[in-house]
Amino acid sequence: MTEHTKKLLEKPEPPESNECCGSGSCCPCVWDYYRDQMKLWRAQQAELAAANSTDAPAAGTDAPSTS
């Protein structure tokens, strides 16, 4: 049986100042790529946060008793 898992994305680093020519004619610009990668990373972080919040007991409640 094969287990399918998503690869955990690393937070993208913004482009270095020397990576963008500033002409506005590059398609896609390194900043476009960065924004796309940030959008993917944020979506994954939101999924992880939602999954973790459903796994943990709600605030103010006790964990189920084991006795």
Image (cartoon, rainbow, N blue to C red):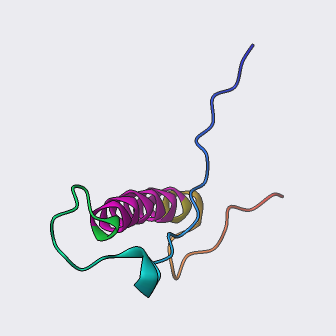
Tell me, yes or no, whether the highlighted magenta stretch contains residue 34: yes
Looking at the rendering, the stretch of residues picked out in magenta corresponds to: 32-51
Left or right, 55 with reference to 46:
right
Identify the residue shown where x is 38% and y is 56%.
Answer: 40
Q: Give the left or right position of residue 4, taking residue 27 as reference.
A: right
Residue drawn 44% across and 62% down? 41
Q: Residue furthest top?
A: 1
Whole-percent x, y for residue 21 in the image: 30, 76
Task: Please indicate whether residue 26 sits to the left or right of residue 10 in the image.
Answer: left
Query: Magenta includes 4?
Result: no
Q: How many marks?
A: 0
Q: Main secondary structure of the magenta part?
A: helix
Front-lying residue, 51 or 16: 16
In the image, residue 1 sits, relative to residue 16, either above or below, namely above
Quadrant (top left, top right, bottom left, bottom right) of the N terminus: top right
User: Residue 50 placed where, x, y %?
Assistant: 44, 60
Give 5 or 17, whichever is nearer the viewer.
17
* Front-lying residue, 42 or 56: 42
Q: Which of the image's four quarters has the C terminus?
A: bottom right
Q: Could you say where residue 19 lies in the image, as x and y percent from the top left?
A: 42, 75
Residue at 42% across, 86% down:
17
Q: Residue at x 52, y 82 (%)?
A: 60
Outermost right residue: 67
Front-lying residue, 34 or 16: 16
Residue 43 is drawn in which quadrant? bottom left
From the top left corner, tell me how far across and down residue 33 is, in percent: 34, 60
Determine which quarter of the picture holds residue 52.
Answer: bottom right
**In the rendered image, the vertical position of residue 40 relative to residue 53, given as above or below:** above
